[in-house]
Image: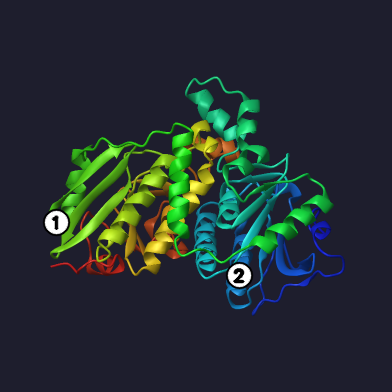
Amino acid sequence: MIDGFADLLDPGTAAPFRFSHAVPLGALRVARASVHGRAVAVIAIDQGGKRGAIGITEADALAAVFDALVAQPVPLVLLLDSSGARMDMGLVMLAAFRRLLAVALRARQRGVQSIAVVRSICYGGASMLAYIAQRRICTATSRIAMSGPAVIASLEAKEGVDCGDMDVEALLAGSARARLIEHDRLCADDADALRSVLAECLDRLQEPAADALAQRHRALFDRLGRFDVDLPRSPSPSPPWLKQRMDALLGAGFEAILGAGLVRGVRLRGGREITITGIVGGAPLGAAPSWMLAESIITSVRTRPERPIVILCDSPGHAATRADERVLLSEYLVHLAQTVQWATEQGVAVSVWILGEASGGGYVTLTAACRSVLALPRADIRVLPRTVIASVIGGTAQDDREPERWLQLGLVDHVLPSDALTDAAARGAGLPPVG
């Protein structure tokens, strides 16, 4: 049994989790059990030689558990001591994690309750799963972030920044993370203490409030202010390259750049208005841009629910800076993904149009819950940004850059050979047909 698995459960209560079909588990361990008499499902990942990394098999098994709990609801306890997704597996892994995040988002939307317990590291995609959960329990040895200290330090060094590993470690520590969210808990790394706090958290799990999205959106805005993170608010006309491409794709309208690559605007197609938002120009998807993209989507849905929403993407992926990790980037990315999920649940067609680079956590965040993904000319889908590949997997990722392969893997739904919409792509995005 995995360390930290059995000692959180009531003795003798662990039993195999029942799936409707055979599900390979890989390094995943799944059981039904009880904690202080409360029935739960529990998942743990054997750290082994990969530091608990989530491979394709484990991602598919996690998705199967979330799916099963929609029909047979009990709270889920996620023991997330993991370095994140196995990015050395390439684009197949990226596609698998997109599927997993989509299923996890739908499960939470449908009332599946979960608590994440983090006793050591929880990086990358694993940290996104932690913040889909309603609550988290951390210890003094917990480290939670989208990017680990080595990645942050490596990028800082390239930019000539004096990087102090201890300072980065302090940012990611469980004590710092637990302070950011009211209901999260910091606990001694002791089996009895963890079981007691876990039982308390299970007793306090509640159905999500009707305005949970709005409450979370306000709380994340307030956090940016507390940490003096400025939101770009000075629009300038979209650059000529973007205007030219959008003129070819859609009719009259405009886009403005608010700074940090953020796009806002309105376009027309067949006399119908379309909300344009997104991140372009090679800007990374940080906490502030994530919040502002969520703000654009929420505003469009609430004020003009008849409008389809197009999210433009030309970004190397999620940001890997101290400033973004200080405010807990993983939660901002999950909030943005949940906002896309919420918009689709309201019946709004949300599509992602990849104009240039898309990779890693940024790609997964934007595409997990959208209606369709279009790859346009010059699209470049990668498992990780070029700048962090060496830091994360110690070499060069063998990404397949053939658009037909992207279609086969489910990374995109349509590939456009030119900046002109086809009828199929337009229908997929919920837009009026060509002509």
Q: Is residue 282 left or right of residue 435?
A: right
Question: Which quarter of the picture shows residue 272?
Answer: bottom left
Element type where label 2 sits in the image: helix
Return the residue nearer the eye: 254 or 409: 254
- Residue 355: x percent and y percent? 31, 49
> Of callouts 2 and 1, which one flags the residue occurring earlier in the amino acid sequence?
2
Q: Is residue 167 left or right of residue 15?
A: left
Residue at 44% across, 64% down: 408
Residue at 63% across, 69% down: 65
Question: Which quarter of the picture shows residue 374?
Answer: bottom left
- Residue 377: x percent and y percent? 29, 51
Please give the label number shown on residue 64. 2
* Residue denoted by label 1: 251
Figure check: 422 above or below 227: below
Looking at the rendered structure, the kind of residue marked 1 is Gly
- Residue 330: x percent and y percent? 53, 46
Figure check: 84 above or below 286: below
Return the residue nearer the eye: 316 or 16: 16
Q: Is residue 175 left or right of residue 335?
A: right
Q: Is residue 412 left or right of residue 147?
A: left
Return the residue nearer the eye: 244 or 12: 12
Disc 1 residue crowd, few under 14, some 14–19, many 20+, Cα 10 Å: some
Looking at the rendered structure, the kind of residue marked 2 is Ala
